[in-house]
Image (cartoon, rainbow, N blue to C red):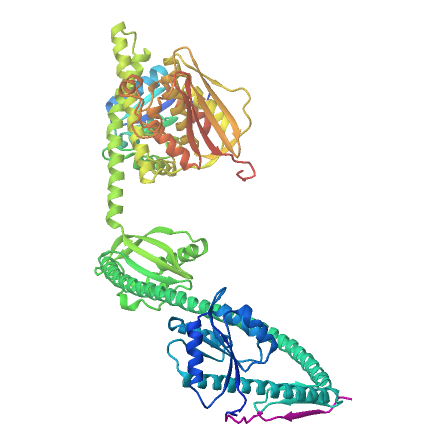
Amino acid sequence: MEANSLQRIMMIEDDLDIQAVAQLALETLGGFTVELCSRGHEALEKAPGFGPDLILLDVMMPGMDGPTTLERLRALPQTARVPVVFMTARVMPHEIDHYKTLGALDVIRKPFDPMTLSSTLNTIWNQHCV
Amino acid sequence: MPARLAFIRVGVSKFIVDTAVDIMEAPIKILLVEDNPAHAFLLREHLADQHDVRFDLTHVEGLEAAFPHMEEGDLDVILLDLSLPGSVGLETLQLVLPRTPHIPVIVMTSHDDKRMAIQAVQEGAQDFLVKGQVDGVLIVRAIHYALERHRLGAESERYLAQMQASEARFRAVIERNADAMVVVDTEGEVLLTNPAAEEAIRDARDDLERSVQDRTKELARSNEALHAEIAERKRAEAALQKAHDDLEKRVQDRTVALSVINELLQLEVDQRKHSEQILRESEARHRALLDAIPDAMITISRDGTVLEYKAPREGILPQTPSQYPNKPIAEVLPAGFGRLVMEHVEEALETGQKQVFDFQLPINQEGHDIEARIVVSGEDETLCILRDITERKNAERLKTEFLSVVSHELRTPLTSISGSLALMAAGATGVLPAQADAMIGIAHRNSERLVRLINDLLDLQKIESGTMPLKLEPVEVLPLVEQVMEANYAYGSRYGVTFELDEDVPDLWVHADADRLMQVLTNLLSNAAKFSPAESTVAITVERHGASVRVSVVDSGPGIPEEYQDLIFQKFAQVDASSSRQKEGTGLGLSISKAIVEMHGGAIAFDTVPGQGTTFYFDLPEWHEEGVEV
C-alpha cells in the first residue's frame, strides 16, 4: 500500500441506513477503513483519534450541520488539513458552489452509486491529494 | 384718239290726221263677194236707198271670180261673205287679204258667226256686218269707217316709211360721224349708237370689263382672303369654343373633384372628431389604467433628468412624486439605485434594447426587491418602470427552498434504497436465490428511475425559472463524448446495444457547460439504447457543420411516427404510454436536452425514417482557441 494512498475514511452521516450502505460499499467493495459518525460533535471527538485520510461529510444534520462541522474540523490541528468531500442531496448549483467555497474538495450527490463510490473517492483523492 | 360722244335726245313723233271723211263725189267702188243672190240683192237695195252716196257695186259669187278684180286694184272696198263655196270662214279672208293689201275688206257673216267675225277683224278685216241685222245706213257707215281706217292706215304707213327713211338718213349721218354718238330717249334708254360710240363704249366696256375683271379678281382674292379669314375665324371660334368647353369641363370636373374632396374632408373631419373622442376615451382609460398600476413610472432624459413621473399611491419609493420633475434621477432615488438606473438608461439608449435588473432597496428598515425595466421611449428619452417584486421574490425563494428541501427529503431515503439494492444486485451482500435476485433487480432499476425523475424535475424547474446556471468553458468535444459513452456502456449493455464512435473525429471545441453537455449526450445515448433492437449498434459522429459542431446519435430503432414528431421535444412526451413504461423513461429528457442546447446558443433536431431508425443531433457554435467563435 502506498503511503499517500487513500485508506482511512471518516463518514459523518445522520441517516443510519445511508451509513450502512456506504460502509458496505467502502469497506467491502473499496477496502477502506471506515469510521462512522452520526453527528458533527461525534466527529469532532473521534476524528483526532481516528486520523482519517479523508472525511465524507453530510450537509444537513441535526444539531451541527455539515458546513459548521467542517469549520470546526478546520479548527482542530489534527483535522485542519484533512480533505473533506460533501455527500448531500442538496445539490443545487449555488449550493455546490457554496460547499466548495467552504473548502470541500468535491461534492458527491445523493443518491450515490455504492458500486462506484469507492472509485469516485479514489479519483478525487488522486486528483487533489497525490 | 377716242371719238367724241354726243347724245341726241328726240321727242315722241306725233302725227295729226284729219279724221273728217272726205266725201268724194266719185262713186265708191265696191266688190261684193256673195254666193247668196238674195243677200246680194238685199245689199244692193240697201245701198240704193242711200242717196247721199254713190256706189259702183260689182257683185261676184265666188273667190275665183273675185281675184281678177282684186288684182286690177280698181276698188275702194270689198264686202266679203265668209261662207263661200270651196272656202269657209277665216280661210276665205286669209285667201283674200294677201291679194288686196291696199283695199279695205268688210266681212259679212251670218248671225251665228259673230265670234268668227270678230276674229276676222283681228286677222285684218276693217269691219264686219251681220246678215239680217243691217240696213243701208249701217252699211254706208261701215263702208265709210272702213275706208277711213284704211286711209289712215295707208297714211300711217307712208309716214312710217318717211320716218324710216329719215331715221336711215339720221342713222347714216350718225354712223358716219367720227365722233362717238349715242341717241337716248327721255327715259335714258339708248336708241342708237354710232361705231365711234360703240368703239368708245367697247373700249370703255373693255376697260370696264378689265376693271370689272380686275375688281372681280380683287374681289375674289378679297373674298378668298375673307373666306380664309372667316375659316380662320371659325377655327379660332371652334378652338375658342373647344377651349371654353374644355374649361367648362375642367371647371365641372374640378367642381366635382372639389365636391368629393370637400366630402372627404368633411368625412376626415368627422373621423378626426371621432378619433379624438376615441383618443380622449382611450386616454382616460389609459390614465385610469396607469393610476391602477402599482408601478412607479419615470421618464428620464439622457442626462438623467426626470421629465415625468407617475407614482403609485402607496409608494415603494421614499419621496413624494411632486419632488421628482426636473431633478437628476440620482437625487431622486437612493444613491446606489439611482446610479444603477442611470447606467442602464445609458445602455438602453446606446443599444436600443430593453434593460431589466433587480435591486434590493431598504425601505422603512425592510429590504424591498425592486425590479427596474428601462425602455427607450423617445429620442434621448427612456421610460423607467419600477415594480415592487418583494412578494414575488419571496415566493421564488420559498419555492426554491421548498424544492431543495423536497429534493433532499426524497433523495435521502432513495439513497438508502437504491444503494442497498445496488449492492445486493451486485452480489456485495452474498449470492441471492434466483427469484430474489430478479426481484432485487426490478427494485433497483425502478429506484434508479425514481432518482432520474427527481433529477429531471429539478432540472426542469430550474430551466423554467431561468435559474439553471451554466458554467461555460472551452470543452473539447471528443473526450467528452468518449466519457459519456464509457459512462453509458453498462446502460447500453442492459439493452444489448453497443455505442460506436466515428473514427475520424476532428479536433473540435465548444464553449459549454461540460456537465450539462454530458447530460444531453447521456439522454440521447440512453434513448438510442432503449429504442434500438438488441445486438444493434448506436453510431455517434462528431463533425464540423458550417460554423457549428454537430454531434449525432444514430439508432436503428422503430423511428418516430409522423403524428408524434411535433411532440417529441415536449414534456412527458414519448411515442406511447406502453412504450414509456416499457422503456423506463421520464418523458422529460428531450425537453431538458433541447433547453440546455438552446441555452448554449445551439439547436437540436432529428431525422427519422419509420421502421429504419432515428438520428438525433445537436449543433453548438464551434469555439476556437483564440477565443473567436466562427
Q: Position of residue B563 (x, y in %)?
A: 33, 25
Residue at the (34%, 15%) spot, across then down? A28
Quick one: quadrant of the N terminus of chain B? Answer: bottom right
- Comparing B240 with A98, the one in front is B240
Is residue B18 within the magenta segment? yes
Name the side, left or right, on which B83 lies relative to A47.
right
Toward the right, the furthest residue is: B1
Name the chief secondary structure element in magenta: loop
Q: Position of residue B136 (x, y in %)?
A: 41, 84
User: B159 and B468: which one is in front?
Assistant: B159
**Image coords of residue B380 (percent x, y):** 42, 62
Residue sitting at x 27%, y 7%: B432
Q: Quick one: B217 or B528, which is closer to the camera?
A: B217
Residue B548: tell me if it is visible. Answer: yes
Q: How many marks?
A: 0
Quadrant in the picture for residue B458: top left
- Whether residue A18 is visible, yes or no, is no
Residue in front for this viewpoint, B205 or B601: B205
Work out whether B441 lies above or below B380. Answer: above
Residue at 65 percent of width and 78 percent of height = B218
Q: Is residue B276 above or below residue B115?
A: above
Query: What's the magenta region?
Result: B1-20
The image shows residue B487 at horizontal and vertical percentages of: 41, 21
Magenta stretch holds residue B290: no
Q: Quadrant of the C terminus of chain B?
A: top right
Q: Is residue B49 above or below residue A40?
A: below
Image quadrant assignment for residue B38? bottom left
Where A75 sits versus A14, above or below?
A: below
Say left or right for B304 vs B578.
right
